[in-house]
Amino acid sequence: MVVVFVVNGVLMASLFSRVPDVRRGLDLANGPLGLLLLCAAVGSVLSLPTAGRLIQGLGVATVLRAGALTGVLGLVVLGVAVDLTGSVPLAAAGLLAVGVGIGLWDVAMNAEGAEVERDRARTLMPRLHAGFSLGSVAGALLGAGVLWVDLPVLPHLGVVGALALIASWRATAVFHEAPAAPAGAAGVVPPALGAWTEPRTLVIGLMVLCFAVAEGSANDWLSLALIDGHGAADAVGVAGFALFVAAMTVGRVLGPPVLDRWGRPRVLAAGAATAGVGVLLVVLPGSTVVVVVGIVLWGLGAALGFPVGMSAAADDPRHAAARLSVVSTIGYAAFLAGPPLLGWLGDAVGTLEALLLVAALMGPALLTVLAARPEPVVPPERVGR
């Protein structure tokens, strides 16, 4: 199970490691490059709402394999565009396919992870997402290596994509053959679109959005904020981001027993408060030690929001796929809208000060954590009575 999370992280980090080559190969300025990269996010947002319905009809293994195949083909198309044709429309089509594939893959792997959690009756999702983080680190290191030897984009992404496809295909062989959302007593699978009208699901989505901004903003802006706001050298800024990723990974590895002991709402509330304090320590004037402590607290506090939100959305196996689709769509909206919003704020008030928005969003996160309480599941034989 953890393999598909790790491979997903490797694939995404491999793509991001070649962004400078995409800019150079297509001869783009930063503005057009940003619009091009937006195609991947758009592809994910378009595919996420349909993923639940597909899983209900085809099962998680089939949908994850389809997502992996689509994403890898998109990477190959991108490589052809950058190395061989120099075509921006072709690159946009490739990135759109990558986004669609990753969106399907994301919902399917979280649906399977939630199913494994239920079978083992203990919290596992944070550790699965830690696998994604470790895969991202591995993919980034691999990207640095191929850049060092000046390997073109197509062979890099093509080989990594082929290996990812093989690994994901083999890993899904042990997945559940039946659809992730089994039929109720009447033999009818709950409609996927109905999850968009459920207050609990929408509140969980809002909580995940807040935590996703806390995570995504560090990915996009922490290094630049340390460089612009604290005068750090480029290497120190990157080291600060690496520290954040390490803290988040530690939080996800150590989080499950804490969640099992204290429950989701308490742990998530503590996480939101910790992340908020961490961001403030990074932004407000202070010594290097204070900033380092702030980065660690930020990473630890933000670690559990996204994976626990996935678990909460999938509490009821009859509705798991549909609700995961909704929560993932709302959460990914943060990754779509967050970077440009923080960029605009950064231009207005400063890169470092713009991160205060992250601290502010920990307030709504605190107010929504109660929605993550485990939902009582009606036994199948009682459905409809």
Image (tube, rainbow, N blue to C red):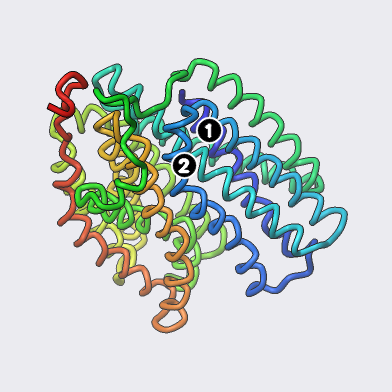
Position of 188 relative to 216 (above/below):
above
* Amino acid beneath label 2: Ala
Position of 214 relative to 163 (above/below):
below
Which one is in front, 153 or 54?
54
Residue 113 shows in this picture: yes
Position of 162 relative to 76 (above/below):
above
Local packing at callout 2 (Cα closer than 10 Å; few below 14, some 14-19, many 20+) is many
Local packing at callout 1 (Cα closer than 10 Å; few below 14, some 14-19, many 20+) is many
Secondary structure state at the residue bearing disc 1: helix
**Image quadrant of residue 309?**
top left
Secondary structure state at the residue bearing disc 2: helix
Which one is in front, 35 or 136?
35
Q: In this view, which residue lies farthest toward the bottom?
A: 348
Which residue is found at the position 17% from the left and 35% from the top? 375
The residue singled out by tag 1 in the image is 63
The residue singled out by tag 2 in the image is 51
Q: Is residue 170 left or right of residue 161?
A: left
Residue 324: image x %, image y %?
A: 36, 41
Q: In this view, which residue lies farthest toward the front?
A: 186
